[in-house]
Image (cartoon, grey):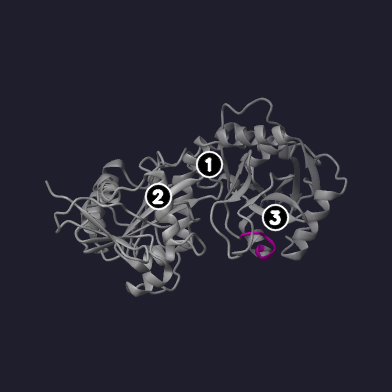
């Protein structure tokens, strides 16, 4: 039987080798944090907890289909990644993002294709001498986040993805019952997809997310498409976050004074005022512990967890004069409008776009959260005067709505209500009676 040796450098870097038949030794791995305990302190902690046998990482990787050929580097610091040859890859965008397992949506590749793709990716990574492993999380609420392990053939990919994930304590991923896995095969042939009848036509690679398998595959330079990577990670993490008591919402977080506000608005409106938001990325988690972002922001000194929102604002667009400029909604009305997303004659449910959780179940959970925490709800018409406000104009419209007396929602005319009912009854035949226009 082949035994595995884990060698640990003084800097905390560790690697596995199958070539030396020595007994296992105690493993000391450390978090790749910008600020964290020193290696000796973590070693002492591991001794006290009695954790971390040397073959643990190797078995964990084997359980994910990857066999270490020579070395596996675990949670390297940025300086150590550079020593391994990591470089900052220029950001790219627009790569194909294939998702399997979204609720109510057609899968963009089959279960059989997913199995064959994963087998090829694991075989490729297993053939590489040096493997790089990084642990992180989606969401900064420890009790309802989604732990993530990255297994990569490239230190540059680890350098890039470490900025996408939240830091997580040592051993958090190995002790998690259902962590996500990101497989990075940057050096694999981009034509490999054609062998399994999967041709996403990505010149620099592609992104494939399988919600059922809790996995994301990145080929070529796909790890540098941060927007695409976040889209895939959001899809695979939502079911786990929900199962742990969190409510994942495609909202933005606005902080006004000491108050947190959730903002649901069209993307063009969001981008015009993104500098005034905590993060331009869509994605928050609301739980009994507070509110957290799915992904870290550019503000490294900002808090990781915010208070439970005092209000939510849903922005619709109507230039016919039917919807008032701003109005207050009941929780039941907010859940109803959450599912629709009216944009000047069409319904674009941007509030749950691309979700892997059933939107109706999400709306029910939102309603319960609104009632439980007595969260105020508002509807803002961003194009009441046939011209959508942008940037500061939009924020000037939102802020008075939050803290001044706003009339209840009273649309002019009844035709819009009929359009809402027609759209939602066709999309959600079993919509609860308490949901109302």
> Residue beneath label 3, please?
254
At horizontal 28% and vertical 53% (from top left) the residue drawn is 198
For mark 1, give the secondary structure.
loop
The image quarter containing residue 207 is bottom left
Q: Residues within 10 Å of mark 1 (few under 14, many from 20)?
A: many
| Residue 278 within the magenta-colored segment of the rendering | yes
> Residue beneath label 1, please?
144
Residue 361, above or below 157 = above
| Residue 181 within the magenta-colored segment of the rendering | no
Q: Quadrant of the C terminus?
A: top right
Q: Nearer the viewer, mark 2 or mark 3?
A: 2
| Residue furthest out toward the right | 405
| Marks 2/1: CA–CA distance | 24 Å
Q: Nearer the viewer, mark 1 or mark 3?
A: 1
Residue closest to the eye, 352 or 50? 50
| Residue 327 screen position, x and y as percent | 80, 44
| Residue 177 screen position, x and y as percent | 40, 38
Is disc 1 in contact with disc 3, using a CB cutoff of under 8 Å?
Answer: no
> Residue beneath label 2, please?
46
| Marks 2/3: CA–CA distance | 40 Å
Residue closest to the eye, 246 or 192? 246
What are the residue bounds of the magenta stretch? 274-279
Horizontal side of residue 111 vs 285, given as left or right: left
């Amino acid at each position: 039987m082949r035994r595995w040796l884990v060698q640990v450098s003084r800097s905390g870097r560790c690697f596995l080798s199958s070539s030396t038949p020595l007994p296992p030794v105690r493993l000391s791995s450390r978090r790749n944090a910008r600020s964290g305990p020193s290696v000796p302190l973590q070693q002492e902690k591991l001794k006290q907890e009695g954790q971390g046998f040397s073959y643990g990482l190797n078995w964990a990787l084997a359980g994910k289909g990857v066999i270490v050929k020579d070395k596996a580097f675990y949670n390297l610091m940025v300086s150590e990644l550079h020593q391994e040859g990591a470089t900052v890859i220029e950001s790219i965008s627009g790569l194909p993002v294939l998702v399997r397992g979204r609720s109510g949506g057609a899968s963009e590749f089959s279960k059989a294709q997913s199995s064959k793709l994963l087998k090829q990716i694991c075989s490729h990574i297993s053939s590489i001498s040096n493997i790089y492993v990084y642990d992180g999380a989606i969401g900064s609420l420890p009790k309802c986040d989604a732990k993530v392990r990255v297994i990569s053939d490239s230190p540059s990919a680890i350098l890039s993805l470490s900025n996408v994930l939240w830091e997580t304590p040592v051993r958090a991923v190995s002790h998690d019952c259902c962590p996500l896995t990101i497989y990075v095969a940057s050096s694999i042939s981009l034509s490999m997809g054609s062998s399994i009848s999967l041709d996403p036509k990505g010149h620099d690679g592609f992104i494939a997310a399988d919600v059922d398998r809790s996995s994301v595959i990145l080929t070529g330079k796909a790890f540098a498409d941060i927007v695409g990577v976040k889209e895939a990670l959001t899809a695979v993490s939502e079911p786990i976050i929900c199962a742990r008591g969190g409510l994942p919402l495609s909202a933005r977080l606005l902080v006004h004074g000491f108050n947190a506000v959730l903002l649901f608005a069209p993307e063009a409106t969001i981008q015009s005022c993104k500098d005034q938001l905590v993060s331009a990325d869509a994605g928050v988690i609301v739980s009994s512990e507070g509110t957290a972002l799915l992904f870290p922001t550019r503000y490294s000194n900002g808090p990781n967890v915010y208070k439970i929102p005092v209000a939510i604002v849903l922005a619709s667009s109507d230039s016919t004069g039917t919807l008032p400029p701003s109005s207050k909604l009941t929780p039941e009305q907010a859940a109803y409008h959450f599912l629709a997303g009216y944009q000047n004659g069409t319904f674009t449910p941007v509030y749950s776009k691309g979700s892997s959780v059933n939107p109706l179940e999400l709306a029910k959970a939102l309603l319960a959260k609104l009632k439980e925490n007595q969260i105020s709800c508002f509807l803002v018409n961003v194009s009441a005067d046939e011209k959508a406000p942008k940037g500061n104009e939009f924020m000037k419209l939102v802020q008075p709505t939050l803290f001044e007396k706003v009339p209840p929602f009273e649309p002019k005319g009844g035709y819009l209500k009929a359009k809402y009912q027609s759209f939602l009854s066709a999309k959600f035949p079993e919509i609860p009676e308490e949901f109302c226009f």
